[in-house]
Amino acid sequence: MVTDIETLTSEKEKCFQLLLREANNQAISQLCENKITELDIKLSNCKRQLESDENERAQKIQENSQYVLDFLSNPLGIWKIGNFRQRRGVLNLCFTEPITYNREEKFGTPILSPIYGLFQDFPSSTINWYARGDSNA
C-alpha cells in the first residue's frame, strides 16, 4: 500500500513536470490535468485504505492486549475452566520456575514471572491469585 502511494506520487510529479514543460500545448495540458485529477483520487483512496488498515491493526492490538491483561489479572479464572494444556500454560506464564514440594514445608513459593512486576503499583485486589476461602490461600 505504501509503495502504491509512492508510485502514484511519483507519477503525479512527472505529470506536473510535463504540464510545466508543455504549458503552451492545450491538448497535452488537458491530458496532464485529467491524469493529475485521476491520480489525486487514487491517492486519496490509497491513503483512506491505509488509515483504515492501521485503525484495524490498532483495534486488534488493543483487543489482544485486553485479553492478556484479563489473563494476568485473573489467572485463576483460566485455571478453573481450562484443560490440562491450558493449566500448564497458566503455570508457565505465571512462574519462571516449577512449584516445589517438600513433605515438611508443603508447597514452596515459586518465583513469579517478571510480567507481574507491572502490577506492583496496582492494588492487590486487582490480581486474583486464589479463590476466597480456598485452603491454599
Image: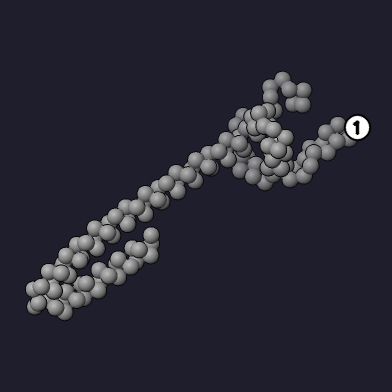
- Name the secondary structure under disc 1: loop
In the displayed structure image, the side of residue 123 where residue 18 appears, left or right:
left
Q: Residue at x 37, y 54 (%)?
A: 50
Q: Residue at x 10, y 73 (%)?
A: 27
Q: Residue at x 32, y 56 (%)?
A: 47
Compared to 43, does 134 lie above or below?
above
Q: Give the position of the C terminus as an image quadrant.
A: top right
Q: Seen from this angle, which residue lies furthest top? A: 133
**In the image, residue 98 lies at what x, y percent?**
79, 42
Q: Seen from this angle, which residue lies furthest right? A: 104
Q: Which residue is mark 1?
A: 103
Residue 124 seen from this side? no
In the displayed structure image, the side of residue 46 where residue 69 appears, left or right:
right
Instruction: Identify the image quadrant of residue 23.
Output: bottom left
Compared to 15, does 46 lie above or below?
above
**In the image, residue 115 lies at what x, y percent?**
64, 45
| Tally of marks | 1
Disc 1 crowd, CA 10 A, few/some/many (<14, 14-19, 20+):
few
**In the image, residue 8 lies at what x, y percent?**
30, 66
Mark 1 residue type: Arg
Q: Residue at x 45, y 47 (%)?
A: 58
Instruction: Identify the image quadrant of residue 67.
Output: top right
**In the image, residue 64 lies at what x, y percent?**
53, 42
